[in-house]
Amino acid sequence: MWAIVVAGGNGSRFGGPKQFAPVGGRPLVEWSLEAASACADGVVLVVPEDELVAEPRFDRAGADVVVSGGPTRAASVRAGLAAVPDGATIVVVHDAARPLASPALFRAVIAAVLDDGQVGGAIPGVPVTDTLKEVDAGVVVATVPRDRLVAVQTPQAFRAAVLRSAHAAGGEATDDAALVEQQGGSVVVVDGEPANLKVTVERDLALVEAALADASSQEAR
Protein backbone atom coordinates (compact mmCIF):
# COMPACT_ATOMS: atom_id res chain seq x y z
CA MET A 1 0.00 0.00 0.00
CA TRP A 2 1.37 3.39 -1.07
CA ALA A 3 0.26 6.93 -0.34
CA ILE A 4 0.45 10.10 -2.41
CA VAL A 5 0.58 13.36 -0.46
CA VAL A 6 -0.40 16.21 -2.75
CA ALA A 7 1.44 19.45 -1.93
CA GLY A 8 1.86 20.88 -5.40
CA GLY A 9 -0.44 23.91 -5.28
CA ASN A 10 0.48 27.58 -5.29
CA GLY A 11 -2.03 28.58 -2.59
CA SER A 12 -3.73 31.39 -4.55
CA ARG A 13 -6.53 31.82 -1.97
CA PHE A 14 -4.06 31.53 0.89
CA GLY A 15 -1.65 34.09 -0.50
CA GLY A 16 1.25 31.66 -1.02
CA PRO A 17 2.16 27.97 -0.80
CA LYS A 18 0.13 27.06 2.28
CA GLN A 19 1.66 23.59 2.46
CA PHE A 20 4.85 25.14 3.85
CA ALA A 21 3.21 27.51 6.33
CA PRO A 22 4.33 26.89 9.93
CA VAL A 23 1.76 25.35 12.25
CA GLY A 24 2.38 23.65 15.56
CA GLY A 25 6.11 24.31 15.21
CA ARG A 26 6.37 22.49 11.85
CA PRO A 27 5.55 23.17 8.20
CA LEU A 28 1.98 22.10 7.42
CA VAL A 29 3.05 19.36 5.00
CA GLU A 30 5.06 17.51 7.66
CA TRP A 31 1.91 16.68 9.63
CA SER A 32 0.30 15.07 6.58
CA LEU A 33 3.48 13.20 5.71
CA GLU A 34 3.69 11.82 9.23
CA ALA A 35 0.13 10.48 9.17
CA ALA A 36 0.53 8.96 5.70
CA SER A 37 3.87 7.30 6.41
CA ALA A 38 2.46 5.68 9.56
CA CYS A 39 0.04 3.67 7.42
CA ALA A 40 1.81 3.16 4.09
CA ASP A 41 4.64 1.01 2.77
CA GLY A 42 5.84 4.04 0.86
CA VAL A 43 4.91 7.68 0.30
CA VAL A 44 5.18 9.83 -2.81
CA LEU A 45 5.22 13.55 -2.09
CA VAL A 46 4.15 15.92 -4.87
CA VAL A 47 5.55 19.47 -4.63
CA PRO A 48 5.79 22.51 -6.90
CA GLU A 49 8.47 22.13 -9.55
CA ASP A 50 10.67 24.90 -8.11
CA GLU A 51 10.68 23.15 -4.72
CA LEU A 52 12.79 20.34 -6.20
CA VAL A 53 15.71 22.64 -6.86
CA ALA A 54 15.29 25.08 -3.97
CA GLU A 55 16.66 24.73 -0.46
CA PRO A 56 14.22 22.36 1.31
CA ARG A 57 11.73 24.21 3.50
CA PHE A 58 10.69 21.13 5.46
CA ASP A 59 11.81 17.68 6.57
CA ARG A 60 11.19 15.23 3.73
CA ALA A 61 12.07 12.19 5.84
CA GLY A 62 8.50 10.87 5.59
CA ALA A 63 8.64 10.79 1.79
CA ASP A 64 10.21 7.90 -0.12
CA VAL A 65 9.90 9.72 -3.45
CA VAL A 66 9.50 13.45 -4.18
CA VAL A 67 8.19 14.55 -7.59
CA SER A 68 7.02 17.81 -9.12
CA GLY A 69 3.34 18.41 -9.66
CA GLY A 70 1.34 19.78 -12.56
CA PRO A 71 -0.85 22.82 -13.23
CA THR A 72 -3.95 21.19 -11.69
CA ARG A 73 -4.65 18.90 -8.74
CA ALA A 74 -5.44 15.99 -11.06
CA ALA A 75 -2.20 16.52 -12.96
CA SER A 76 -0.28 16.52 -9.68
CA VAL A 77 -1.91 13.27 -8.58
CA ARG A 78 -1.04 11.73 -11.95
CA ALA A 79 2.59 12.76 -11.44
CA GLY A 80 2.55 11.10 -8.03
CA LEU A 81 0.81 8.01 -9.36
CA ALA A 82 3.50 7.56 -11.99
CA ALA A 83 6.04 7.22 -9.17
CA VAL A 84 4.06 4.58 -7.28
CA PRO A 85 5.57 1.10 -7.83
CA ASP A 86 3.64 -1.18 -10.19
CA GLY A 87 3.32 -3.77 -7.43
CA ALA A 88 1.23 -1.51 -5.18
CA THR A 89 -2.36 -2.77 -4.91
CA ILE A 90 -3.85 0.08 -2.87
CA VAL A 91 -3.10 3.79 -3.28
CA VAL A 92 -4.20 6.45 -0.80
CA VAL A 93 -4.34 10.08 -1.92
CA HIS A 94 -4.16 12.80 0.72
CA ASP A 95 -4.03 16.59 0.56
CA ALA A 96 -1.17 18.19 2.46
CA ALA A 97 -3.63 20.95 3.38
CA ARG A 98 -5.42 18.54 5.77
CA PRO A 99 -2.81 18.20 8.54
CA LEU A 100 -5.24 16.91 11.17
CA ALA A 101 -6.25 13.66 9.45
CA SER A 102 -5.51 10.86 11.89
CA PRO A 103 -3.76 7.57 11.12
CA ALA A 104 -7.05 5.93 12.14
CA LEU A 105 -8.81 7.66 9.25
CA PHE A 106 -6.18 6.37 6.83
CA ARG A 107 -6.72 2.86 8.18
CA ALA A 108 -10.50 3.20 7.88
CA VAL A 109 -10.53 4.03 4.15
CA ILE A 110 -7.93 1.35 3.43
CA ALA A 111 -9.95 -1.27 5.33
CA ALA A 112 -13.13 -0.33 3.47
CA VAL A 113 -11.45 -1.10 0.14
CA LEU A 114 -9.80 -4.30 1.34
CA ASP A 115 -12.97 -5.65 2.96
CA ASP A 116 -15.10 -5.52 -0.19
CA GLY A 117 -13.74 -6.88 -3.45
CA GLN A 118 -16.36 -4.96 -5.45
CA VAL A 119 -15.34 -1.56 -4.12
CA GLY A 120 -13.04 0.60 -6.21
CA GLY A 121 -12.46 3.30 -3.61
CA ALA A 122 -13.37 4.61 -0.17
CA ILE A 123 -13.62 8.20 0.97
CA PRO A 124 -14.33 9.90 4.32
CA GLY A 125 -17.41 12.08 4.59
CA VAL A 126 -19.10 14.13 7.30
CA PRO A 127 -22.78 15.11 7.40
CA VAL A 128 -23.77 18.46 5.94
CA THR A 129 -25.31 20.56 8.71
CA ASP A 130 -26.00 23.85 6.91
CA THR A 131 -29.11 24.42 4.83
CA LEU A 132 -28.10 24.36 1.16
CA LYS A 133 -29.57 26.64 -1.49
CA GLU A 134 -29.21 26.54 -5.27
CA VAL A 135 -28.70 30.09 -6.50
CA ASP A 136 -28.91 31.61 -9.98
CA ALA A 137 -27.80 35.22 -10.51
CA GLY A 138 -28.08 35.90 -6.80
CA VAL A 139 -31.60 34.52 -6.50
CA VAL A 140 -32.51 31.29 -4.70
CA VAL A 141 -34.06 28.81 -7.12
CA ALA A 142 -34.20 25.74 -4.86
CA THR A 143 -33.46 24.39 -1.42
CA VAL A 144 -31.32 21.27 -1.76
CA PRO A 145 -32.26 18.30 0.48
CA ARG A 146 -29.24 17.48 2.60
CA ASP A 147 -30.22 14.08 4.04
CA ARG A 148 -28.22 12.25 1.35
CA LEU A 149 -25.30 14.70 1.21
CA VAL A 150 -21.88 14.54 2.87
CA ALA A 151 -18.87 16.84 2.80
CA VAL A 152 -15.96 14.79 1.49
CA GLN A 153 -12.41 14.79 2.85
CA THR A 154 -9.07 13.11 2.21
CA PRO A 155 -7.38 10.64 2.64
CA GLN A 156 -9.10 8.65 -0.10
CA ALA A 157 -8.13 5.03 -0.77
CA PHE A 158 -8.42 3.19 -4.09
CA ARG A 159 -7.50 -0.03 -5.74
CA ALA A 160 -4.39 0.95 -7.67
CA ALA A 161 -5.65 -0.43 -10.98
CA VAL A 162 -8.92 1.47 -10.64
CA LEU A 163 -7.18 4.76 -9.82
CA ARG A 164 -4.67 4.36 -12.65
CA SER A 165 -7.49 3.66 -15.11
CA ALA A 166 -9.45 6.69 -13.94
CA HIS A 167 -6.45 8.99 -14.35
CA ALA A 168 -5.50 7.50 -17.72
CA ALA A 169 -8.54 9.26 -19.17
CA GLY A 170 -6.88 12.58 -18.34
CA GLY A 171 -9.92 14.16 -16.73
CA GLU A 172 -10.10 16.95 -14.18
CA ALA A 173 -11.98 16.94 -10.88
CA THR A 174 -11.73 18.35 -7.38
CA ASP A 175 -11.04 14.89 -5.95
CA ASP A 176 -9.96 11.50 -7.22
CA ALA A 177 -13.22 9.81 -6.31
CA ALA A 178 -15.00 11.89 -8.95
CA LEU A 179 -12.66 10.55 -11.63
CA VAL A 180 -13.30 6.98 -10.48
CA GLU A 181 -17.05 7.63 -10.48
CA GLN A 182 -16.84 8.95 -14.06
CA GLN A 183 -15.37 5.58 -15.09
CA GLY A 184 -18.21 3.68 -13.41
CA GLY A 185 -16.21 2.70 -10.34
CA SER A 186 -17.90 2.06 -7.01
CA VAL A 187 -16.91 4.40 -4.18
CA VAL A 188 -18.06 3.93 -0.58
CA VAL A 189 -18.13 6.48 2.22
CA VAL A 190 -16.76 5.95 5.73
CA ASP A 191 -17.20 8.28 8.67
CA GLY A 192 -14.94 11.29 8.32
CA GLU A 193 -13.48 13.37 11.12
CA PRO A 194 -15.04 16.77 11.85
CA ALA A 195 -11.62 18.00 13.01
CA ASN A 196 -10.06 17.09 9.67
CA LEU A 197 -10.36 20.60 8.26
CA LYS A 198 -8.75 21.80 5.06
CA VAL A 199 -6.49 24.84 5.33
CA THR A 200 -7.70 27.23 2.64
CA VAL A 201 -7.12 30.73 4.01
CA GLU A 202 -4.63 32.04 6.56
CA ARG A 203 -7.11 32.19 9.45
CA ASP A 204 -7.53 28.40 9.17
CA LEU A 205 -4.03 28.04 10.62
CA ALA A 206 -5.28 29.33 13.97
CA LEU A 207 -7.90 26.57 14.03
CA VAL A 208 -5.26 23.95 13.32
CA GLU A 209 -2.97 25.39 16.00
CA ALA A 210 -5.81 25.21 18.53
CA ALA A 211 -6.64 21.62 17.59
CA LEU A 212 -3.01 20.53 17.87
CA ALA A 213 -2.64 22.25 21.23
CA ASP A 214 -5.80 20.55 22.48
CA ALA A 215 -4.59 17.14 21.29
CA SER A 216 -1.23 17.69 23.01
CA SER A 217 -2.98 18.67 26.21
CA GLN A 218 -5.15 15.53 26.09
CA GLU A 219 -2.09 13.32 25.62
CA ALA A 220 -0.34 14.94 28.60
CA ARG A 221 -3.22 14.11 30.95
Image: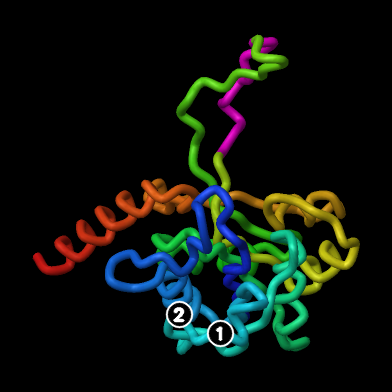
Picture coordinates of residue 69 (x, y %)? 69, 72
Residue 148 belongs to the span the image colors magenta: yes
Residue 132 vs residue 162, the one in the foreground: 132
Q: What residue did someone put label 1 on? A: 54
Q: Residues within 10 Å of mark 2 (few under 14, many from 20)?
A: few
Please give the label number shown on residue 163: none
Q: Calculate the distance from the C-alpha at mark 2 to the C-alpha at mark 1.
A: 8 Å
**Split into 4 quadrants, where in the image is the N terminus?**
bottom right
Which quadrant does the C terminus fall into?
A: bottom left
Element carrying mark 1: loop
Q: Position of residue 210 (x, y in %)?
A: 25, 53
Q: Quadrant of residue 118 in the image?
A: bottom right
Which residues lie in the magenta part?
140-150
Q: Residue at x 33, y 64 (%)?
A: 23
- Give how far across and how far down residue 194 sits, in percent: 40, 46
Residue 81 in the image: above or below residue 75: below
Label number found at residue 57: 2
Apparent side of residue 170 relative to residue 89 in the rendered image (left or right)? right
Give yes or no for residue 146 being in the magenta stretch.
yes
Which residue in the rendered view is the most extreme toward the left? 221
**Mark 1 Cα-neighbour bin, 10 Å: few <14, some 14–19, many ≥20:** few
Q: Who's the residue at 46% across and 53% down the image?
A: 199
- What residue is rendered at 49% in x and 36% in y? 127
Q: Left or right: where does residue 216 sit relative to residue 59?
A: left
Q: Is residue 108 visible?
A: no
Q: Are marks 2 and 1 in contact (CB under 8 Å)?
A: yes
Residue placed most toward the observer, 50 or 20: 50
Q: Amino acid at mark 2?
A: Arg
Amino acid at dot 1: Ala
Measuring from the top left, give residue 197's x and y in whole percent: 43, 50
Q: Is residue 81 above or below residue 74?
A: below
